Structures are given as C-alpha cells and as structure tokens.
Image: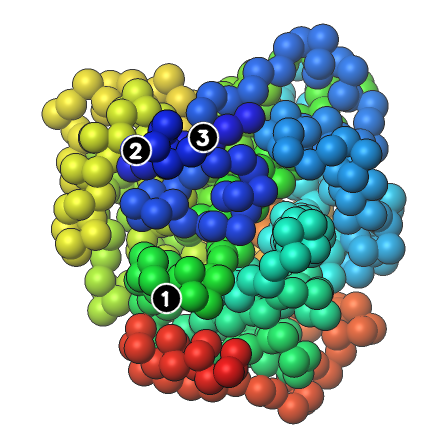
Amino acid sequence: MRYLSTRGHTPGTQDGPPPSFSEILLAGLAPDGGLYLPQSYPQVSASDLEQWRGLSYAELAYAVLSRFIDDIPPADLKPLVARTYTAQIYGNGRADTQASDITPLRWLERPDAANREGGLAILELSNGPTLAFKDMAMQLLGNLFEYVLAKRGEEINILGATSGDTGSSAEYAMRGKQGVRVFMLSPHERMSAFQRAQMYSLHDANIHNIAVRGMFDDAQDIVKAVSNDHAFKARYKIGAVNSINWARVAAQVVYYFKGYFAATSGPGGGASNRLVAFAVPSGNFGNICAGHIARMMGLPIGRLVLATNENDVLHEFFRTGVYRPRATAETHTTSSPSMDISKASNFERFVFDLVGRDPAVIRELWAAVDAGGSFDLSRTPFFDKLPDFGFVSGTSTHADRLATIRHTFETYGLMIDTHTADGLKVGSQLRTPEMPMVVLETALPAKFEETIIEALGRRPERPASLRGIEELPQKVEVIDVSVDAVKQIIERSIA
C-alpha cells in the first residue's frame, strides 16, 4: 500500500518511490500542502464481511488496518493494535456499559422483525480516557508513533490544533511517550471548562498547551503554515495528530465496520448486505470522511448523514455545491463548540474522490480556498455525481440541541452531549424505513455540563477520576494569532 497527495505530489523515479504508511504517519501534511490518501482503496468482499462479523474490536481493527499498513510486520502490528483496544483503556465511561465491547451499540428504537422500520441507535464511541470519540484513533496513534520512532531512532514534535476534544485525546495518548513532544493549539476561552481543564491540567514535560486568541480555524491555519514551512518542519521534526494525519482517519474507519455489524445482527437486523445509514456530527469532516472511505471499501453504507451546528459550511456545500469557508468574525460560538469550524481540513480528501482524483482540479479549487475565497461546483458534472457518494445533510441549532437532549432523556432514559444531539436531531429527520440509522456519539455529556444543566436542570455524572478536574492547577501559554509566536515557543521548548 502506497500513498499519494491530493494535490499531486507523488514522488517518482527522481525522488524515490511513493511514501509508505510509516513515512506519512510522521509527515502529516504532504510537501505540496495536500493530504495523503491511498493510491487506491482496498476492497472488502461479502466473504470478508462475514468473516469479520464476529471479531472483537481489536481483531477487527487489525483486519481493517492491515489493509492500509504493509510496512509494519504483522507480528508487530497485531500486538500493537491488541494493546490499544482493551477494556482497561476503554473502561472510563458509563458504569452501565460493557467495556469489553469497546463501542457498544445502544438501540433507541429497535428495527422490527419485518424490516418495516429501520431502527434508531447510538454507537457509543466515548468510553476512552478523555470521554470523546477522538480516543478511538488517538490511542492507536500514540502507540504507532512510539513504535515507528523507536525503529528509526528518531524523535518528533507534534503540532496540532483542537476545537475541544482532539487536544485532550492527543495529550492523554502521547503523555510519557518516548521521542514525542506535543504542542497543542486551542481557541482561547472558546471550549467548555471541562475540555480546557482536561488539557491544561496536564503538567507532563512533553506536553505544551498554547491558547490562541481567536477561533479554531485561526489555530488550524497556524498549524498548516508551520507545516508548510519546509525548512522549519525539517529542522524541528514537526508532525501532526489532527485528522490531516491519514492514520487518524484510517483508525476511525474501523468503528464504521463495528457499528455496521452491530446494526445488522440479531432479530430485525436483516441480511448481511443490508444497507445502514450513519449520522455524524461534523465540523472538520474527519469523522464522516472515515465513513466515506469505509463505503468506498465496500461496506454497505446506504447514507452518510452529515450534521452541522450553526456553522453550516458543509451543509451549504451538499445543498448547493458551493464551498465557502467563513472568516473568524463569521464563525459562531455555540453550545457544540467542537464543531465551531468553518474550514474543514478533511473535506479536501472527499472532493479529491468527487472530482475523479484529479490533483489539477484540487490545486485549482484550493488555490481559491487558501487565498481566502470559495469555489462553486454547482454548474459542473461533479455536482451531479454527489448522490453517488451517499451524502445528505442537515443543521441543528442551540434550541434543537436542548430539545433533543430533553426528548432523549425523557423518552429513552439516556443523557447525551450537545454534539451527539446535533447528530441525533438531523439523523432522526433524515431516517428512512428501509435502513437502520446509527448516530455516532461524539462525547459524554460530562464534558458540556453547562448546557446539560440548561436542558435538564441536573448535572451529568462523571467518572470518579475526573471529578473536580476544573479545580486542578492549569498550565497554558496564551498568545495572539501568530505563526511566529508558535515557532518561538517550539524553538524555546526544544533548546
């Protein structure tokens, strides 16, 4: 398995062979500013699906990831994956959840035996150390980085940006890892108090928190600018853990397979090739991009339901064909803050497939985006191809979130977080009777206590290990929006 850039930089004879998985794991962003993807997606057959159906999460993760990783020997990769996905690591969530399931499916409305009603379910993805779905990929990344760096005798300085959950997931996965330092940018005072505390209360020597006086998009732009300074990147060995890193997306593909098997087993589940719909709260497009890739591999996904909050850039594209990233001043601060994003980094990967994997088209489209503009595919043949990829979309507001949280708690006895509420609201609207609707959980409600109290008049429960986390001493450096300031912090910390 070899990889290429969405913008066309694929090393040829003069530069050496196309990069391997381990090479792009450490590189993050491609040299031309594009994102890495496999040269072709590995295909899974109906026979593969039947063989994989009964596997544990760790076994399934190995089966899927080994299709993307061929430069780590199976004798090393298999135990690495096995020690990543354990009940001990994913046992920090709800007391009523079987940790051994890793990602249990919770039916809200079961499909009926005659398949007249597809059913509605939530796939629990938030039982990891930081109570967010990002743990599903980030714990693997921590182990992959440590393994590859040890083999190469190298170190890496990870530079990332977070809108809320990536930061803590990355830091908990990388803390104490040999050869790894983390520099994590976050929008100053624009995350929940719990999210800030999870990150800033870490005092490990290899963890550096930087709060940027701006929005997530400003922080993300800084990460890309530093990564595109090739001399600085090479000198300070800069890598990435944001979903611009292909390994993050590849790891997230696994739980679509696991969710599919859970939704199509048992009474009312239907045949092995039955279509399933997934509703995904979407800000940076990484989570739903993994679903797109699972579908391209052959997983029978009938619909990918993209749910946005008030920052509806992606919904606008799927409705109109216009991709118009917003400026910081136009980006709303909402009660689902991890989706307060107006420049979706992973969207480039999907558009690359949409335009027939033509890097010249991507370079033209993103030249406009990178210059602060937009693009319009509505009058092109590409827009006509959108239905072939199974995407539909919708939006959710603060009032919708409150109503969905109340309804879910009163009807099903389940407390959900604000982002999952966005997914459930839009997924419920776009349900169809012929296929189950699986909503991907984003985080546990404890991370967004203020809004849960507003919706339900009560505090969400927390794992004992995270009670009172806001009272712990915090360590963070606050800066203006400045690429140079971040470079100086990196230089100072490494000197």
Classed neighbour count for the residue bearing mark 2: other residues with Cα under 10 Å, few (<14), some (14–19), many (≥20): many
Of 408 and 251, nearer the camera is 251
Mark 3 crowdedness (10 Å alpha carbons): few <14, some 14-19, many ≥20 = few
Mark in the foreground, 3 or 2: 3
Between tags 2 and 1, which lies in front?
1
The total of numbered circles placed on residues is 3
Q: Name the residue under label 1.
A: 232
Q: How far apart are marks 3 and 2 (CA)?
A: 14 Å
Is label 1 in contact with label 3 (beta carbons under 8 Å)?
no
Residue 320 higher or lower than 28, as above or below: above
Residue at the spot of label 3:
17
The answer to the question of whether label 2 and label 1 lie on touching residues, with beta carbons closer than 8 A, is no
Task: Left or right? Give the position of 123 relative to 35.
Answer: right
Which residue sits at x=79%, y=53%?
A: 90
Sequence-wise, the earlier of marks 3 and 2 is 2
- Secondary element type, mark 3: loop
The disc, 1 or 3, on the residue closer to the chain's N-terminal end is 3
Say what amino acid the circle numbered 1 marks.
Phe
* 13 up-or-down from 424: above or below: above
Question: Badge 1: few (under 14), some or many (20 or more) residues near its Cα, within 10 Å?
Answer: some
Query: Does 459 sit left or right of 40 as displayed?
Result: right
Q: Which residue is drawn at 38% across and 45% down?
A: 30
Give the mark toward the camera: 1 or 3: 3
Indicate the colouring scheme.
Answer: rainbow
Q: Is residue 140 visible?
A: yes
The local secondary structure at tag 1 comes to helix
Label 2, on which residue?
A: 8
